[in-house]
Amino acid sequence: MNDKLKEILLQVERPARYVGGEFNLPDMNKKCDERVCMCFSDKYEIGMSNIGIRILYHILNNMEGIVCERCFAPDLDLAKLLKENNMPLFSIETKRDLKEFDLIGFSIQFELQFSNIAYMFDLANIPYFAKDRDESYPLMVAGGPCSVNPMPFAPFFDAILVGDGEENLTKLAKLHKELKSQHLTKLEFLKIASEQIDGIYVPAFNNRTKRAICKNLDETFFPTKILVPNCAIVHDRATIELFRGCANGCRFCQACFFYRPIRERKVDTLVKYACELMDNTGYEELSLSSLSTSDYSGLKELVDRVRKEADDRKVKLAVPSLRLDSFEAEIYEELNGASLTFAPEAGTQRLRNVINKNISEEDIDKAIIGAMKNNVKNVKLYFMIGLPTETKEDLDGIANIAKKVVWLHKQYGTSKIINVTVSTSVFIPKPLTPFQWERQIDLEEMQEKQKYLQEILRIKNVKYNWHGAESSVLEGVFARADEKIAPVIVEAYKQGCVFDSWTEHFDFAKWQQAFDKFGIDMNYYRAEIEEERPLPWDIIDNGVTTKYLLKERHLAYEAKTTPNCLHKCNGCGASKLGGCFQK
Amino acid sequence: MMIIVKHVKAGDFSYVSHLDTMDVLHRVLKRAKIDVNYSQGFVKHMLTYATTPIPLGAQSIADYYAVDCNNITPQDFMERFNANVPEGLKAISAVQKQKNPNLAGNVIASDYRIKCNNILPVEIEDIKEKEEYTIDLVKKGEIYQKDIRPMLFDIFVDGRDLWVRCASGNVNLRIDSLVKHLIKEYKIETTVNDITRLNQLVKMDDKLVGVDDFLNTLQ
């Protein structure tokens, strides 16, 4: 680290985020022909908690001839000092200028991080648009959950990687290394890469691409010698990924449809990973992660075996993402004195059927009674507002569930007090879901519904939190936007928009100004879409067919549910990608 | 039993805050599979004890960390500890004692060396002759002035090096605040990165002795 940077770091908050040197750091001095920088468009504490970043960072560093470094969005204090001192954004490991890398990969987690792409490009002195970058700049690619619809940010990148990075990013990096001696142009290289590797969308070619998947997750690399940060991060724990995909089919949920088909790891493999992770990290908590842990076929055996290993090491075991209807006596015991968090998502059974959230009133009652008998003092309930077909009765249903929790505490509670927290977010129609054609409710409607809920949730021991309506509008725009939005993102960044997912930084007025400057109406992207209209994300072949999504949409309007696909294949189409346990 | 390890905090690790360092050290102990004793409260925590923090960015070759643990020799402890630390942390010695020496309570002073880029004016040593020496200090973001002379035990210059012995522990003079003041008053060219804690001292028989010597007197 040079003296200037040392001095700058003394002036910023939590400088440990920028210096690296974490335990288990891979060998940065190994012989390498391809230097990759993994960029994350949010702060260190968020990025280092991301399991995808952990996997890809270590998988690349385990490859021969490839070194992978990291770069996270610096906090505003560091960004200001870098600009003032005319210093470019740097990688954590070797403090290298991003322009010196061969390949830069951005992981884009959700829509409100889009302005941070422009922020990081600007700090790195890299032109925003791929068309403005000559061959002297690194090959710049992006992936992550937002690649479901990459169009709003596609013009910034040379290529978008769609699907499991273990498959397409590793193959791309290897090929880039191998073809280096041929001195191909970026487009010449990407032509070859997109023909050979699944899940590589090149905006310049506008090629339809099939999502890349790891067909055999059990045999796919999973890092157990992971970096252990030297400062607190959001999810400061060891995590094992049980399976990828989700069998439930909640109709609003993008992850559920995007990550199909379901691919599990074996219990023996997971126990081995858990032990290695605990030994290699020294973390005091181990988490079992997936989209719906209850659906893991070997959950009981896994929890029993991992718990024994964790207890021996004085490590706490966390089992998040449990479905309400899967609660069993032993899970209630785990809750003793702690909080119960669950997401009915909708206030009435009718609306839960519409969104295919397959939990009943009985499931909710059973879970709450179980929790009350086990000394639970805090119950957190998550709902969405603005769902298709929602009525006032559905909003009343939210208050009814909250009241019921308070009443059940009076009947069965063993704790002296009960605190119920109701949180609502706003429904955002997301690409590749059965609700991708739906309209998002207007800002005024959001605010009215939130106001109504504030009134009806004035109940003793009940607290109501709601997610910002304005940021939901923006998220709604970005989710289904096309490439016309890219210059708006740059403009908004220039006007000061950055870290939009952080409430203290979000400035909706500036976004509105940026949209106005380009004459783009936000509402265009939030309106209902005719089923026949081509969609910006049609270039992504996700396996799940449009026919299936439409069928699900129509079932939603009939308030008919589709069962969990663990028991019977519903024919969504994802199995054609390979690796599905059903076929 | 108690193992007291003397360790270095240096290089880029000096940017890690004291609280974060405590978490890092707990993970080091777990990775090293040291059989540490835990508190018996509702939220159990490792029984470990550290000495006064150094400022963010400053380095130390004399930080102490006492660990209540079982069935391990100081030598074995040190080897396992050093095999599991991140870059910038390193144990340089370890001793075994029957009880916690309560270094946090017993240490009353620290020695620091501040490396500077210019030849230092000897007038800095005149501070020792003053009855009062008031500098700006910061508490919870508020700047206030304080006479720190009673907390400054010794100060001398040696070419480009400044040597300071000052209060450390329950009564503490923040060395970075003093250095910032000297930069302004005597135009010395240095930064917090150039501060190194060399020693921590305990009062025994009215004399200041190093923690290593103090530990040698304990069983």
Image (spheres, coloured by chain):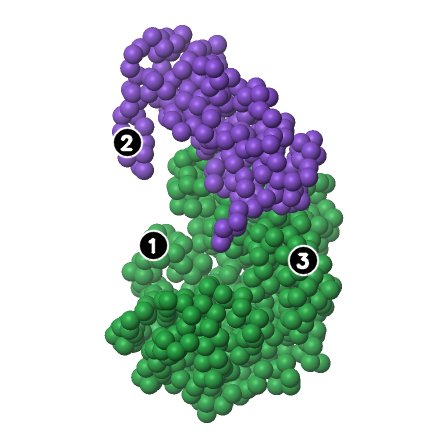
Chain colours: A green, B purple
Asked if disc 2 and disc 3 are in contact, CB closer than 8 Å, the reply is no
The reply to whether label 2 and label 1 mark residues of one chain is no
The quarter holding residue A30 reads top right
Look at the numbered disc 2 and give the secondary structure of its residue.
Answer: strand
Residue at image coords 57%, 65%:
A319
Q: Residue A504 carries which label?
A: 1
Quadrant of the image for the N terminus of chain A? top right
Chain for mark 3?
Answer: A
Position of residue A38 measured from the top left corner of the image (x, y, whole percent): 58, 51
Q: Which residue is drawn at 70% across and 73% down?
A: A579
Mark 3 residue type: Glu
* Amino acid at dot 2: Ile
Q: In which quarter of the image is residue A349?
A: bottom left
Residue A132 visible, this angle = no
Q: Mark 3 points at which residue?
A: A309
- Give the alpha-carbon distance from disc 2 to disc 1, as whole Å: 26 Å
